[in-house]
Image (spheres, helix red, strand yellow):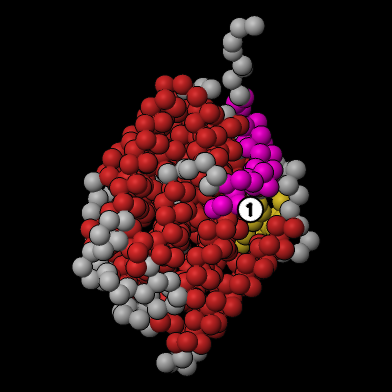
Amino acid sequence: MFPWLTTLGLIPLIGSGVIALLPKGRDLLAKQVALAISLVALLVSLLMLADFQKNSGGLQLVESHNWIASFGIKYAVGVDGIALLLILLATILAPIVILASWNEAENGRFSVKAFFALILILEAFMVGVFAATDVFLFYVFFEAMLIPVYFLIGSFGGTQRSYAAVKFLLYSLFGGLLMLAAVIALYVISKDQFGAGTFDITALTKLHIGVQLQRWLFLGFFIAFAIKAPLWPFHTWLPDAVAAATPGTAVLLVGVLDKVGTFGMLRYALPLFPDAAKFFTPAIIVLSIISVIYGALLAIGQTDIKRLIAFTSISHFGFITLGIFAMTSQGLSGATLYMVNHGFSTAALFLIAGWMISRRKSSLISDFGGLQRVTPVMAWTFFIAGMSALALPGLSSFVSEFLVLVGTFTRYPWAAIIATVGIILAALYVLILVQRSLHGPIAPGNENLPDLSRREKYAIAPVLAVIIVLGFFPKPLLDVINPTVVQTMQVVGVTDPAPTGGK
């Protein structure tokens, strides 16, 4: 079998090395090489998708090689339907971010070459973290992703970039250390029960772990994933990171990297510790609802456009976590679809907001009044992205949000009812943003702002196309997701609630 996943991870990694070796001052060539490499990676991911059997819920495209044999550590990769779509999300967004960020690195502490090389390194690590089936390998990629993100924020961001980068790093390292302790404990338990230690995810799901120990280990994984997600109250690093980061970095951070948290809950926390997951579910449901409402309320009160988008994402991740821990087929399918849809809608918001900020030299919402009259193309694209963020029917986020709420209602009606308040609040923060930035009198300083360039139109067009197409036809993605959801529910030992009602 062709090593699709290894090849896909190596392409951007090799590309970053090629960029690093380019002569000093060849900035345009570095951008062109980065774009070409990311497009090659996208092509390979599409070919990999064609080789994937969508009706199988288990791992496919599996590769396994001894890495540190004395500790049972392997380079082991494989994908199920959920991991496959998240890898595809990463490989689609990478060339879009590169094209959209053509001029973002001009004022950074490091060279333009470094900026685009870091994006490619990050893409390689994103592929690795979603593909890893060895828990130790997953942890390595989980921590390795911090390095390029730290430098992308700290070296190419705004005025508070150093503070935001350090805060992001400290939060993530704290969560990673908790998970590392749990990973080591799993190895020790596997060595005791199997006679030889292992980090293989399939083998580890067969461990017999005591009730109390399982709960502690679950918390080690869950807190790390909740910080990454981010879920309230582990979210405070996100608004600062997003506000300081370049728009392209924010897209990869919120659109893809944060999905590692919710993906980890599905791939590791639930199957490895099913009893502990069920025990903590009521508390996690409460945290999810708080995230939904809290994120939306704070978004309404923001005056900075990037911080507003950051708080909307906290609300959206509350919905995703709610769907995961509802532990119903509709909830899990909706949560997974939500991860993909949120990636595209957030990408559109951040990219267009970034272009608005670069033109106006301000991120204050009040400075963008009347853009509909001055820059109609930019205004309409921002409007469509905003409508997707509030889950307007006909756009991609609607189906996923609907599935999450229906799936949650069948098991936790009270939680679904409270969470619907988040939909109302979403309408408020999006419509207020649209009204203040796009409509009304033309704000002073906006009279001669240029509309989207040809390059910017090429960058945003595929994102908007995906948002619209998936709004009307999400079936291809659900066909890939649903078999994996069924498999996950079998491993966790849960079934959908029996239908109720009279004749």
Of residues 152 and 173, which is closer to you in this image? 152
Residue 425 in view here: yes
Residue depicted at x 32% and y 73%: 449
Instruction: Find numbered disc 1 in the image and state the secondary structure of the residue it sits on.
Output: helix
Residue depicted at x 68% and y 62%: 46
123 left or right of 60 in image:
left
Q: Residue furthest right?
A: 1
| Vertical position of residue 174 compared to residue 102: above or below | above
- What crowding class fits label 1: few (fewer than 14 Cα within 10 Å), some (14-19), or many (20 or more)? many
Of residues 415 and 466, which is closer to you in this image? 466
Numbered range of the magenta stretch: 467-495
Q: Position of residue 220 (x, y in %)?
A: 42, 41
Q: Is residue 481 magenta?
A: yes
- Predominant SS along the magenta part: helix
Residue 217 in view here: no
Q: Give residue 315's quadrant in the image.
A: top left
Of residues 431 and 473, which is closer to you in this image? 431
Q: Is residue 392 magenta?
A: no
Residue depicted at x 30% and y 47%: 432
| Vertical position of residue 61 compared to residue 37: above or below | above
Residue depicted at x 64% and y 56%: 77
Of residues 261 and 374, which is closer to you in this image? 374
Check disc 1 and give the amino acid type: Leu
Q: Position of residue 320 (x, y in %)?
A: 47, 40
Q: Position of residue 238 (x, y in %)?
A: 33, 53
Q: Residue furthest top?
A: 503
Q: Give residue 355's quadrant in the image.
A: bottom left
Q: Position of residue 346 (x, y in %)?
A: 44, 55
30 left or right of 360 in image:
right
Image quadrant in which the N terminus is located? bottom right
| Vertical position of residue 5 compared to residue 436: above or below | below
* Label 1 sits on residue: 84
